[in-house]
Image: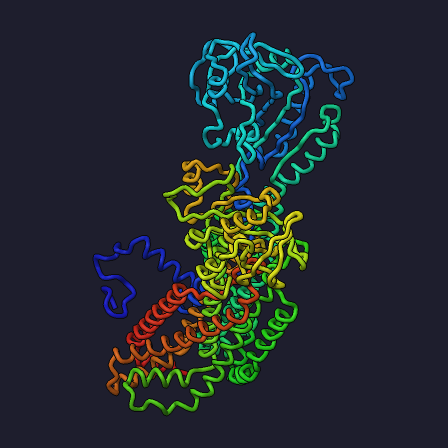
Amino acid sequence: MEGGGRGSNRLPAGQAFARTGRARGAAFLRRATRRSMWVQAPFLLVRFPALLLAVGGAIAVLVAAVASGPLFLSSAQNAALEKQLAPVSKWNGGLTVAATGRVSGPLPYGSPYGVATAEDLFEQRDRLLREAASQLGGLSPGVITIIGSAGQATLPGQFLPSAPIRLLYRDDALGRVEPVTGPVGSGVWIPDRTASDLHIRPGQTFVLTLASGTARIRVAGVYRDLSEAPLADFWSPLYTYIEPYGVNRVLPPAVVLADRSSFSKLEGRLQDDASFRWEFPLRSRRMTIERAQVLAAGLQQLQVKIAGSVPPFSGYFHYPTVFTLLPDAVDQADSTAFALKGPVGTLSLAAVIVALALVAATGVFWLHRRRVEFRQLAARALPASVLGIRTLFEAALPAALVAVGAWFGTRALIGVVGPSTLVSPEAIDAAASHAIWTVAGAVGLIGLVVAAGIPRQVRSRVGRAREVAGRIPWEAILFALAAASFYEISTRGTVVVSRSGGPPKVDRLLLLFPLLFIGGSSALSVRLARAGLGRMRGVGRRWPVPWFLAFRRVAGASATALLLVAAAALSIGIVTFAGALSTSVRASADQKAAAFIGSDVAIELGGADPRLPSGFPFPATLVTRYAAGPTLIPQRTTVEIIGVDAATFPQAAFWDRSFGDEPLPALLRGLHTSNPLRLPVLVLSQQGIGPTTLLIGTSYLPVDVVGQLRGFPGAPPTTAILVTDRDVMVRTLQAHSISRELLSSDVELWARGDPRAVVAAARKAGLTVLRVTEAKEVRSSPGLLAITWTSGYMAMVGALTGIVALVGMLLYLQARQRQREVSYALAKRMGLRPGAHGLSLLAETAGLLMASFVLGTLFGAIAGALTFGRLDPIPALSPAMRLRLAPSAIALVAAILLAASTVGAALAQGRASRANAAEVMRLAP
């Protein structure tokens, strides 16, 4: 026919040039792809959206499972290193070399150095150290500090007033202080307290007297004393020369700053042996563990060479001090990483196995979805091996594209949920290599499953294989492995962090048991449910149509559908267990940290008999610690005494109900007695102590035990503790004429609130702060970090297996789509409304997934209850860890399942409504 009518191959008149370049390209592609099934293969899956989605989901989950392990481990290692380096200044983390010697002039006779003058010695030392540090990498340029000996400064011709000072030179020191007055000409800069003590101004001179000599020194300016404010990072390496020390907070000799030329001249006149410091700070405290290991090894080698005077350093250093904290920080980070390798490897392997099972299921779905096509091709004498290879070509391109996207998605996910956003390039390369080979193997597995299944499809013997597989008691195997794991855990008393003289290590059996237990319990429940549902197909005949149809489908569901229920229950159980573990560990870490130090922050106070200021802005209490030394008679047990203030202790100190049989106020009331000659105490001891006598020096103090404790805030875990009232303790000692000097005591302030704000308030109130201990120091211990991060990775593995369950639901819906369309077409002619059918689909999918939700949540909680007694990361510290579920995570899982059910039912209903009934009936097997 002409003119573009029906059946014509030509366009209507006037539209010959209407075809765009896009249309011409599409037409060319259609002609090209008709040439061979091999040419069509890479793009053929576009015609099968469900199959394409199944392949994409399986490959995405597999890539995430393979790549997440190395990436998460690297993230955890780097995070552990960051936490170890956080309290370490860049100066202490780098390299510090200290040596003594003259600053200028000829060296003394008999000097062990191979040069004649102090200037030559300094130049050789400086050159060697800078060359060695530059070869390491990761260190910033060196800063030189030269510290003179302490001496007395007086005015010319006078002995009083005097002030202790020491000369000091440091690169850029004069630019790092706050000028008060000056400069006036050349000279040195003195702190304002020295200027006040000597009554001296810029332009005047003073006399510095050392044991080795005397020199007149001109003052160029006055700067704000560095001890009056928190020490800046630049001055932190010299804190011992600046900050007050000791219980009475004695100030060290004042630091007098001089430029390099003036310092050399003055030291030369004084004939002083100064201390030289070369400091090469870390360029950055944010580095990968691999880079830190290389740098730490280089620093340790350099330490050995310098301290041992190994060439090229021989002859230039005599008993130097070489210092760096980086190797210790790296060792601690390695310990945390070592604790993670086993569990993360185990969980990653479990996720890979589940993902490979999904890949194999995708191959089965591929075979089922295209069974008519495969039968036709097999009828043309095409071997199954050829069809399997063709399947490889079809899956290769989509799998590669999805793998690339999944790779970048996994990296982004680790950046969000991982302990650190920093991942080592070495880990990225290893993960990429593993992912490439695994994806290639997965594509091969799909082809192998298809090639192996085609003969069975042709001979209709698929049911026999399923029947045999269905008879295998898989749940019994899982239960046997779970029982073996639990037996090992129970009999050998495994704890989550086992040291045995080595680094901490998380026992992988404590993580394998929940996986095996949840999987076995879910599989057993599904098998029992299938047996029960098979006998209930006649139930519900009078129910509303949507519920009746949904129940009939579920009751007649195949073993594959119920297997998906078990898989979803496993993933939900893992998420439940991991969420409970993470929540419990965080809560336990907070409690143990507060219990270890007593409250949110503990401040050791200086001075004689400090008192808590009235109106202190935070809940606070004073606690007196009497160090171990008193001995119980006749037990001969050395104890530590903790004196508390009963009035303020309950509001400020941490307390857990497991510490005692009575509430804290009742226990504290028992510490007050009318007998001034006997000391009432609460006892914390594993052996238990009754009425006894306390030996202090050579004096005896009668003791009344008014209660037994199982724990107490601030109590060391391995020492017997007596708790008493501070004031009662003092009165009882006085009544027995026992001097308090016989007991070494420290007074601490315990407070709730932000540690920095508490410390600032204490200083503002006039209290002398000696040492500050915060709860976060305990929370950063390797054991707590290891189990916390492991639980996070376990939750991520649970999410991956959840994706497996959702993809499995898609396969379930698509596998029964043809049958559903046939039944819907027939039921529609009998009056079934689309809304009722859609509601039945929603009830079917939601019922299956909600059953998975109930099973997974229940078995995850049971697994937690069975194992949490052994999951305590620091069992020596009270209180013991308790099981706490994560309701937010459980609610989120439920919401996701309901949303997935709704979307899946809507898609299935939409496709059933659009289906051509005649075409469906014709193609129905």
| Residue 911 x, y percent position in the rendering | 32, 73
Q: Nearer the viewer, residue 789 or 864?
A: 864
Above or below, 249 relative to 721: above
Looking at the image, which residue is at 58% across and 53% down? 716
Taking the view exactly as shown, the residue that stands out farthest to the top is 157
Image position of 550 (left or right of 659): left
Going 29% across and 80% down the picture, which residue do you hit?
837
Residue 437 visible (yes or no): no
Quarter holding the C terminus is bottom left
Q: Residue visible at 67% across and 59% down?
A: 635
User: Residue 323: x percent and y percent?
Assistant: 64, 34
- The residue closer to the viewer here, 193 or 629, is 629
Q: How far across and how far down the image is residue 808, in percent? A: 44, 71
Q: Quadrant of residue 159?
A: top right
Picture layout, residue 278 above or below residue 675: above
Which of the two residues, 11 or 453, is positioned nearer the viewer here? 453
Residue 654 in sight in this render: yes
**Image quarter of residue 820:** bottom left
Residue furthest out toward the right: 110
Residue 749 location, x and y as percent? 47, 45
Number of numbered discs on residues: 0
